[in-house]
Image: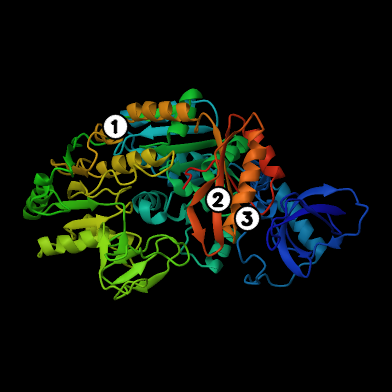
Amino acid sequence: MFYEVIPGRGTGRLETALTYNFDDSLPVGAIVEVPLGNIKVPGIVVKKVAQPKFATKSIARILYSKPLPSHLVKTAVWLSEYYQAPLSSAMGMMLPVGVLKKRRNTGVKASKTEQTEQIKAKTEQKVLDRGGDAGAAKLPFIQLNPAQKMALEGLQKAPGATKLLFGVTGSGKTNIYLEMALNALKRGNSVVLLVPEIALTGQLVRVFQDVFGDKITMIHSKQTEVERQKIFDFLLETEEPRIVVGPRSALFAPLSDLGLIIIDEAHESTYYQENTPKYSAIRAASYMASLLKCDSLLGSATPTVEDYYLAEKKNSLVKLAEKAKDTAVKPEIKIIDFKNRDNFSENRYFSNALLSAIRSNLENGRQTLIFHNRRGSSPLTICESCGEEMVCPNCFLPLTLHADSFELKCHTCGYHEKVPVCCPKCKAPGLIHKGFGTKLLETELKRLFKNAKIQRFDADNKKGEGLEAVYEEVKNGGVDILVGTQTLAKGLDLPKLATVGVVQADAGLSLPDFSAEERVFQLLTQVIGRVGRGHIDKAEVFIQTFRPEHPVLNYAVNEDFEGFSKYMLKKRSASGFPPFKHIMRLDITLKTEAIVLRKIRDLSAELSSDKRLIVSPPMPAFHERTNRGYTWELIIRSSSRLALIEVAKKLDKNFRVTLDPPSLL
């Protein structure tokens, strides 16, 4: 018999299935080992075919007695076409990295016939309703308030597979997640709960673990290859419904009875995979839910304007506008103009009003959160004499000063070096450091408040020093002042937190990207939502900015998502960006800048003749120069996504194509 198999490893840009022979019958989804050139790779059977006219190699062995769930096979094929990703890399995401390594003690190896019989038996096995009264008796009871009950009913009635739960911070979206997960378990279905990063959503994960106990299976980046494979083996073989929690890769957990997908903080850019295969977990979940006829629930207090627009258009939008706790207080928000130096007579980084609030909190045993979305001590190091800027030799981007280790670091590739004693170019000693980051703010606060317990939390924290490691201490008030980036902006519920200070709220507004304003609005809304959650009767937010009149800041301060959405949709419609146009970014990288320019100009002229397309002029990429060479790009927009796919299929395979990117940077 003959089968089409999609290899999942070692195949480069393979875009077609390969034909192999095997003695016995195999189902679609069978996980096998196949020869490919001089190596053996894992693969997945996708189709039984007639004998071809060419010679074929044999499938070497069957790796699992149970096939990969059919919805994962179909999703990989869809993902490859929808995002123009290599078929082999799309299918490879469905398998653990070390799938060929002999780690499992399987006893005596079964013959090929015995293996195929085991597959057949498991494929045909009828699974009884596992919910039952006995199962339900062991499951918890979730208490919903009236607003949450109404929202849950709205979600159950909303048409389509993909639904958006737009709930303000502190409204109790987690309770709705829990109730929907509980209902799925009662039906005998498994659940996937996607989170942007485990570290940023630790509280949500802890709540699910507290409620569902050993029904939870965690997937995260800190697990070893061996641990990941053991989890894959367990989930593939188990007959019991599970709740799988993890980042975007958890979507591809091999659950045979998947009945619900929940995507928390659905606006986060981490749900888009930037390396090959490039894809959006949000869109993949929607496709998967349509296949399985189950719900894919997007939850967010700040959904993307694209998702909000689509959900409203399809009547699948449900709002949860009330805070969950009656004791919740509306924070007092003050916008402080950075340009007025009278507001900063005590300190150049912290306004007088913010410093006064910090002192009051220290006297009354309350916490302060200082937010700044930039790590390090200084983002720019230049020579005072000749103007030479210290840049990364790999990325050619500015190096950031980290004063604690007295190093210059690249936040893109990780390169670091000691701060030079003089300018590498002119040898003058006058290097100066401009700007500021979280490390500098931490140092300044320690100088101002010598007796306070001050802790910084950002991506520079070493293992064991992150927020998740000391969360209970922070929650109980063991830290007086928290300083950090987005690690602190999301998902935190700290009972003693009274004040939030945003050091420079307008950072990011001027980036050359259609989603820049949206990201600033999301971050501000999230960080404002850290206070006023009903634990204490005081909630203050100080927003320091050079642009106090900017509409995005005012929409965030007034918690006016509706107004912000209309503002952004009007701009997107006028400029031709999502959700009104589809986008494809095309990057060309070559060692010689002149050749790159010639190629991209020729391609721009050729594509511009297609009336379906709006083609930008050739432009240098945000990271124009790297150790790979020079990168230039085209931004191509169209009302027809099919038109973009047709273009992508005809391009040189060495060009990098990104469809529907959440950002152009």
Asked if the residues shown at circle 2 and circle 1 are in contact, with their CB atoms under 8 angstroms apart, the answer is no
Which mark is in front, 2 or 3? 3
Q: In the image, residue 640 lies at what x, y percent?
A: 62, 30
Q: Which residue is mark 1?
A: 551
Q: Which residue is mark 3?
A: 595
Task: Say what secondary structure mark 2 lies in.
Answer: strand
Distance from Cα at disc 2 to Cα at disc 1: 33 Å
Task: Say what secondary structure mark 3 lies in.
Answer: helix
Q: How many marks?
A: 3
- Quarter of image, res 614: top right
Give whichever of 348, 209 is nearer the camera.
348
Marking on residue 632: 2
Asked if the residues shown at circle 1 and circle 3 are in contact, with their CB atoms under 8 angstroms apart, the answer is no
| Vertical order, 226 against 472 (above or below) | below
Give whichever of 354, 634 is nearer the camera.
634
Question: Amino acid under label 3?
Answer: Ile
Apparent side of residue 507 relative to residue 18 in the rendered image (left or right):
left
Apparent side of residue 190 relative to residue 478 in the rendered image (left or right):
right
- Quarter of image, res 631: bottom right
**Identity of the residue drawn at 63% across and 70% down:** 104
Residues packed near mark 3 inside 10 Å, few (<14), some (14 to 19) or many (20 plus): few
Distance from Cα at disc 2 to Cα at disc 3: 11 Å
Of the numbered discs 1 and 3, the one sitting upstream in the chain is: 1
Give whichever of 497, 243 is nearer the camera.
497
Q: In the image, residue 463 lies at what x, y percent?
A: 36, 68
Question: Amino acid under label 1?
Answer: Pro
